[in-house]
């Protein structure tokens, strides 16, 4: 994934303040159910510093920016990202990112598929902490949802020398498996990546909601699903600085639903549309 053009919007300060108090209280009340017993001792020292429960009727633009682009996300993807309600909306207590086969267009460019992508840049930027996202994933050949992070300041240079953290990536044609990956090293194409995958014992990630989390400490990053860790990384590099660079700077969160690209391939006749990635909550503890 690569960063693209960002369109910002504003909301009433008063409405935001009330919404933040309500959503923070809700998240604190339910937090214990999303943290594994093994992590509870450590997490008692942590506080919820940022959250969105998506309990309203519209996206909170003080926390999220919708990204619009027609350039395939840097990965030969086939969608166009729009700010239309068909692609990005809040309903039923969830953020809905929807991919459609509708020949949508922006800025004079039309693509066969449209989809949604949001980010927290300059609204939510963190150095270390625990990120939790509870989501239900779509299913189908060529469908590619992701929960990931990019550096806010690019202190060590352009991608990937300043790093990328993929909390969750998923191929729609392999619906029982998710991946967690770090991208780092030098500026493309002198970059590298390391990661691991996790498979469900039964069922698919499209059947129900699951909590995808990352515990990020100085020199150590651990991935988990539903409170169960499945990989820890403690070794990486950056051409721009010494370890623990590049993962010692502020990063922001991105949520998107892509269609096609080298990671998943193109949809085929078996892929139905529309496809939805549903996000129940996002919580950040420090």
Image (cartoon, helix red, strand yellow):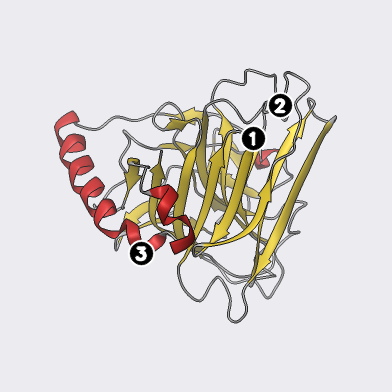
Label 1 belongs to which residue?
Answer: 219
| Residue 50 placement, left or right of 262 | left
Q: Secondary structure at mark 3?
A: helix
Checking the image for residue 273, the label placed there is none
Label 2 belongs to which residue?
Answer: 243
Q: Secondary structure at mark 2?
A: loop
Q: Residue furthest bottom?
A: 202
- Say few, some or many: other residues with alpha carbon within 10 Å of mark 1 (under 14 / 14 to 19 / 20 or more): some
Query: Which residue is rendered at x = 34% and y = 30% of the image?
Result: 9
| Residue 198 placement, left or right of 205 | right
Tell whether label 2 touches label 1 (CB within 8 Å).
yes
Visible residue check, residue 123:
yes
Marks 3/2: CA–CA distance: 34 Å
Marks 1/3: CA–CA distance: 27 Å
Quarter occupied by residue 142: bottom right
Label 3 belongs to which residue?
Answer: 33
Q: Position of residue 44 (x, y in %)?
A: 36, 48
| Residue 46 placement, left or right of 215 | left
Query: Which residue is rendered at x = 55% and y = 67% of the image?
Result: 138
Q: Position of residue 125 (x, y in %)?
A: 45, 30
Visible residue check, residue 87:
no
């Amino acid at each position: 994934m690569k960063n693209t053009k960002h369109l910002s919007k504003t909301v009433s300060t008063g409405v935001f303040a009330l919404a933040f108090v309500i959503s923070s209280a809700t998240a604190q009340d339910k937090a214990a159910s999303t943290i594994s017993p093994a992590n509870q001792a450590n997490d008692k020292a942590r506080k919820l510093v940022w959250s969105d429960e998506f309990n309203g009727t519209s996206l909170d633009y003080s926390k999220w920016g919708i990204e619009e682009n027609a350039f395939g996300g840097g990965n030969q993807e086939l969608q166009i990202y729009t700010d239309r309600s068909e692609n990005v909306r809040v309903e039923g207590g969830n953020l809905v990112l929807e991919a459609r086969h509708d020949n949508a267009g922006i800025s004079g460019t039309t693509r066969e598929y449209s989809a949604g992508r949001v980010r927290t840049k300059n609204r939510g930027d963190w150095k270390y902490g625990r990120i939790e996202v509870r989501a239900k994933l779509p299913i189908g050949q060529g469908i590619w949802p992701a929960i990931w992070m990019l550096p806010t300041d690019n202190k060590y240079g352009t991608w990937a020398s300043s790093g990328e953290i993929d909390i969750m990536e998923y191929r729609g044609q392999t619906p029982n498996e998710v991946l967690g990956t770090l991208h780092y090293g030098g500026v493309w194409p002198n970059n590298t990546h390391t990661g691991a995958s996790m498979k469900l014992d039964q069922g698919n990630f499209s059947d129900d909601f699951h909590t995808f989390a990352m515990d990020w400490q100085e020199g150590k990053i651990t991935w988990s699903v539903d409170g169960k860790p499945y990989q820890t990384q403690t070794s990486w590099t950056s051409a721009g600085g010494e370890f623990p660079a590049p993962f010692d700077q502020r990063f922001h969160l991105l949520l998107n639903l892509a269609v096609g690209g080298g990671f998943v391939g193109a949809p085929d006749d078996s892929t139905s549309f529309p496809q939805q990635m549903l996000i129940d909550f996002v919580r950040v503890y420090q």
